[in-house]
Amino acid sequence: MTGRLAVVSGGATGIGAATAAALAEDGYDIIVVGRRADLLKEAADRIGAGCGRPDAVEAVAADLTDPAQLAPVVAAVGDRRVDVVVNNAGGYLGGDQSTLEGVAAQWRANLDSNVLTAVLLTEALRPALRRPGGRVILLSSIAALRGGGGPYSAAKAALHGWAYDLAQQLGPEEITVNVVAPGYVADTEFFDGRMTPEGHQRRIDATLVGRAGEPADIAAAVRYLAGPSAGYVTGQVLGVNGGSVLGR
C-alpha cells in the first residue's frame, strides 16, 4: 500500500479515528479532517505512533459545511492521488422545534452536517481520486433504515440516494461508492451525555448478538470496502448493526 492516501472526515474521535487507525495499519497515508484542531492533532499523533509511521498522518482543521474551507484539504492532498475518501463527519443536531423557524434551522443544520459535508469533500477531491481503483465510502446510520431520528434519519437516508447516483457516475472509471450504516455504537460522542442506562440496555437487547457495537466494528467494514477485495462492490448499503435491522 506504499504511497496510497486516505482522507477521513470526522477523524478526531470515535468511528472516524478508529477508521483512520485501521487504514494506517494497512499502510495508507492518512489525512484526518475535522473542526476541532486540538483533538484532531491528538488523534493524528496517536494514530501515527500506533502504526509506527509518525509522519504518515496529517491533521487538517476545516468546517466541511463551508465551501471556502475545503481549500486546505485540497492543498494537503497536493498532487497525490486519493485512494479512499471516508465521509464520516456528521451527527444528530437538536434544536428548538416549538416554531417553524426552529424546525427549519434544525433540519438545515442536520442536512448541512451529514449531507453537505460529504458532498463538498467528495466533490473537492473528485479530480484527485485514483482512476481506476478509487473508493468513496459514506457513513450513514441505522436511523436511515428504520427512522427514529427525525431530520437526522432523513439526512442519512439522503446519503443513500446520492451514493447510488455517484456510483453510477464513477463506476465507468472503476471507482466504487458504498455506504456503511452503523447500528448502536456505544463508545462515541453521538449521544453526548443523553444516553441512559435503560436506553443503552434497550439498544443492546434489540440486537441479535447481545452487545453494543464498537468503533472497531465499523472500521472493519470500511477497511473491507476500501481494500482490493471489494472492487466488485459498489452502490451498496452495508448494515453493521448486530442484527437489530435485518438486511433487505
Image: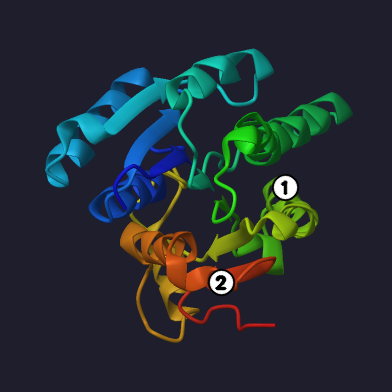
Are the two marked residues, 1 and 2, in contact with CB atoms closer than 8 angstroms? no
Residue reaching furthest to the right: 100
Relative to 186, is 56 on the left or the right?
left
Residue closer to the observer: 181 or 85: 85
Number of marks in the rendered image: 2
Q: Which mark is residue 239?
A: 2
Pinpoint residue 224: horizontal percent, then vertical percent: 43, 67
- What is the CA distance from the residue labelled 1 to the residue labelled 2? 17 Å
Q: Amino acid at mark 2?
A: Gly
Pinpoint residue 234: horizontal percent, then vertical percent: 65, 67
Q: Which residue is identified by label 1?
A: 155
Pinpoint residue 72: horizontal percent, then vertical percent: 50, 16
Q: How many residues crowd around disc 1 within 10 Å: few (fewer than 14), some, or many (20 or more)? A: many
Residue closer to the observer: 194 or 129: 129
Residue 57, by quadrant, is: top left
Q: Secondary structure at mark 1?
A: helix
